[in-house]
Amino acid sequence: MTLIETPVAPAERKTVSSQVNGTVKREQQPDLRPAEWKGYEKVLFRFFFVYFLVQAVPLDWKYYRDIFSLDWSSLHFSNFFYLARYTPRFFSEVPELADWFVVAVIALIGTITWGIVDSKSKEYNNLYYWLRVVLRYRLAVALLAYGFIKFFPLQMPYPSISNLNTNYGDIEAWKLFSMSTGIVPGYESFLGLVELLAALLLLYRKTASIGAFIVLPYTGNVVMSNLAYEGGEYVYALVLVTFALFLVAFDAARLITLTSLEKPTAPNRFNPVLKEGWQKNGRLILKSAFVLVFVVFYGYKTYAGSRNDVYHYPQTPGLADASGIYNVKEFRINNNVLPYSPTDAVRWKDVVFEKWATLSIRANRPVTLTAALTEEIFLDDEKRTYELSGSAGRHYYSYEIDAANKTLTLQNRNKNYVSDRLVLHYDRPDANTIILSGIDQHKDTLYVVLERIDKKYLLEEAAKGGRRRGLKL
């Protein structure tokens, strides 16, 4: 496989003689040989070639172990998401800027070794082309991974009832950002569409620079948002920005000359020449397989997930027809009635039953927060902690229902309170009342009467009539 670059500088043209009707004519023809690179250009290329190859291509054997251990008969879109989100990590499960230092050291060692072994090469046009191919597809697969879970609004879900009934000051910045986007699913889908568009443009050589250019402001904003709202994805997003910068740099000088200096500009003349049949067929097969897997199949799986499984929230159904917020009408502990008090650390203030098997209790008891700063897609309900992560003011419990004995077994979902477990009997004298009685985590007896509040939410009421119509709560 060779690469052709034309034309070269006029100084490198060669003179060709020809004879027509006895007259000798001399004319210059372009020399199609690639121009020789300067010494510093070769050194810089060697460094960036090794650096970006280590950043983009999975070299960890565990990555391939995970691929072969997949259950291919029941693939979930999360499998493709994690395959696409690979980045080298040397210190923790979350990418750190320190990882870049390690990669840079590896690249420096590779640059020195390469320079010693290969001191005769005059240019690296072929390698430069294929490095851009690797980065184009690596960047595209990352954008597809996040683009689809935004386009089918999954990444930032609509707030749960408990979240809607949590004081603003009790919610961490990253959770506020997530919920503020989640309440506008149309906008979230638009953000996903931008990522998908950029990814598709990257798949074609003629439009790759446009796709990479879109990534710079878009993913750059993701970096700044994560820094401003204390999210945990800024390092990975910054990696993608560096990929895009490297791709844009290839056409940057031509773009500046054409648009800013308004001078004639020679187009990109790099063209891969595939001489063998297996090379042409292999290229077509690999590209088709990429589109089939990461665009068609992953897109379909994500769509199916958006219809059947909002992965941030548990899927186990909760108590039938119980979802909503309940006022604590009566609260007894060890048969002693505790009247309402805004400062009482024992008495409950209100209780929320979700559609799934989670209830949350608002009380003055302190809460040690849990964080979910990186995007994770869990299949097990017990690992789906988005509803409680980054939120204080409420204690969240998953529960198991024993319908025969009318018993709820509650377990605090916060990993910092594993001993917080309650076994409560429930009665439902009418559709809006739930009576809980039993033993709490301190072995005290509880008797709680809950009365459902017919609460209206501004988001839902505004959606019914539209923003331009009058609204009355």
Image (spheres, rainbow, N blue to C red):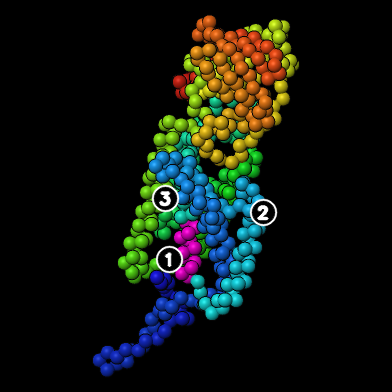
How many C-alpha atoms fall within 10 Å of the one at disc 1: few (<14), some, or many (≥20)?
few
Compared to 44, does 292 lie above or below? above
Residue at point 37%, 53% (across, down): 289
Instruction: Tell me which amino acid carries mark 1.
Output: Pro
Gap in Å between the C-alphas at discs 1 and 3? 22 Å
Q: Residue 111: x and y, percent?
A: 60, 69
Q: Earlier in the sequence, mark 3 or mark 2?
A: 2
| Residue 107 lies in the magenta stretch | no
Judging by the rendered image, the residue that carries numbered circle 1 is 267
> Foreground residue, 116 or 149?
116
Gap in Å between the C-alphas at discs 1 and 2? 39 Å
Residue at point 63%, 12% (across, down): 438
Magenta-colored span: 125-136
Judging by the rendered image, the residue that carries numbered circle 2 is 98
Q: Which of marks 1 and 2 is nearer the N terminus?
A: 2
Q: Quadrant of residue 366?
A: top right
Instruction: Tell me which amino acid carries mark 3.
Output: Leu
> Foreground residue, 122 or 6?
122
Residue at point 74%, 15% (across, down): 344
Compared to 266, does 164 lie above or below? above
Q: Residue 333: x and y, percent?
A: 70, 10
Compared to 197, does 469 lie above or below? above
Please tell me the numbered disc located at residue 200.
3
Q: Is residue 149 left or right of residue 449?
A: left
Q: Residue 37: x and y, percent?
A: 53, 75
Q: Quadrant of residue 412?
A: top right
| Closer to viewer: mark 1 or mark 2 | 2
Q: Residue 303: x and y, percent?
A: 41, 37
Instruction: Tell me which amino acid carries mark 2.
Output: Ala
Residue at point 66%, 58% (across, down): 101
